[in-house]
Structure formats: structure tokens, C-alpha cells
Image (spheres, rainbow, N blue to C red):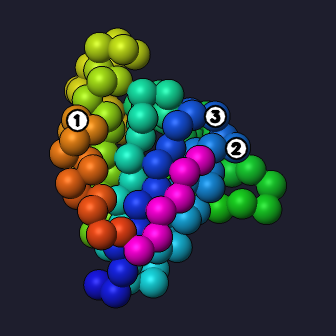
């Protein structure tokens, strides 16, 4: 892998989720080490059925395909541990068992040395 890329998603609405997934998918396509971190505000997007609600916005790729590409190509998708209690999320309701749940300090250790950082 060439570079480490970190993308943080702070909101679960399409204008924040779509660029997070597009940039993450683009990063894995360039063989970057990609880490997506969903803060509690973005957590809803990781629940089963939520990306399907976005549909395929005009002129944009399908968010479900982007999500799957990121994980299938070795990217990491992390949900902030605080979202479990803060947003009432049960881990069994997440859309994929490969989503990791970590606290902020663990994420920051993973993100250390990132060459590219983006926040949406």
C-alpha cells in the first residue's frame, strides 16, 4: 500500500456520507491504506438498510457498492464506540460484521502517520 488515508464522517445525511464513501473507494482503488471513521453523528449510515435509503443519487455511484468496495479491497470502516450508547445502536444492527467498533484513542493510534486526512 502506498499511503495511509483517513476519512472521518460526522453526519449520516447523503451530502456527508457520499463523499466519505467516494473518497474511501477512490483511495482503495489507488492502493492506499484506507480508514473510515464514523463519529456518533454519522453512525446511522452504518445501520442495515440506511445506505439503500440514499439510493443512487443522479450522477453519483451507488453507496452500497462503494461501501462494499472499500471493505472488499481491504479498507477499514470503524464506528466510534460512543455511538453505541449515544445513538442507541446495537452492534448486531450494523450492515456488515466487518465494521469495527473502536474508541477514539484507538482510532487515533490507527490514524497516526496518515498522509491524507479528510472530514465530511
From the image, tell me which residue sits under label 2.
Answer: 15
Q: Residue at image x 57%, y 34%?
A: 11
Judged left or right of residue 38, residue 96 is: left
Of the 4 image quadrants, the one containing the N terminus is bottom left
Q: Regarding mark 1 in the picture, which secondary structure is present there?
A: loop
Q: Tell me the residue at 26%/29% (across/down).
A: 81
Is disc 2 surrounded by few (<14), some (14 to 19) or many (20+) residues within 10 Å?
few
**What segment carries the magenta color?**
115-120
CB-based contact (under 8 Å), mark 3 and mark 2: yes
Q: Position of residue 23 (x, y in %)?
A: 55, 65
Q: Say which of 74 and 1 sits in front.
A: 1
Query: Do the CB atoms of the residues marked 2 and 1 lie less than 8 Å apart?
Result: no
Q: Is residue 105 left or right of residue 70?
A: left
* Residue 90 picture location, percent across and down: 26, 20
Residue carrying label 3: 13
Residue 103 has which mark? 1
Amino acid at each position: 500500500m502506498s499511503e495511509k488515508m483517513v476519512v472521518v464522517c460526522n453526519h449520516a445525511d447523503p451530502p456527508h456520507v457520499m463523499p466519505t464513501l467516494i473518497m474511501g473507494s477512490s483511495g482503495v482503488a489507488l492502493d492506499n491504506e484506507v480508514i473510515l471513521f464514523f463519529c456518533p453523528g454519522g453512525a446511522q449510515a452504518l445501520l442495515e438498510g440506511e445506505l439503500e435509503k440514499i439510493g443512487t443519487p443522479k450522477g453519483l455511484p451507488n453507496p452500497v457498492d462503494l461501501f462494499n468496495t472499500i471493505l472488499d479491497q481491504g479498507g477499514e470502516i470503524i464506528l466510534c464506540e460512543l455511538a453505541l450508547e449515544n445513538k442507541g445502536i446495537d452492534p448486531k444492527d450494523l450492515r456488515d460484521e466487518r465494521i469495527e467498533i473502536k474508541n477514539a484513542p484507538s482510532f487515533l493510534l490507527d490514524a497516526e502517520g496518515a498522509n491524507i486526512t479528510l472530514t465530511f
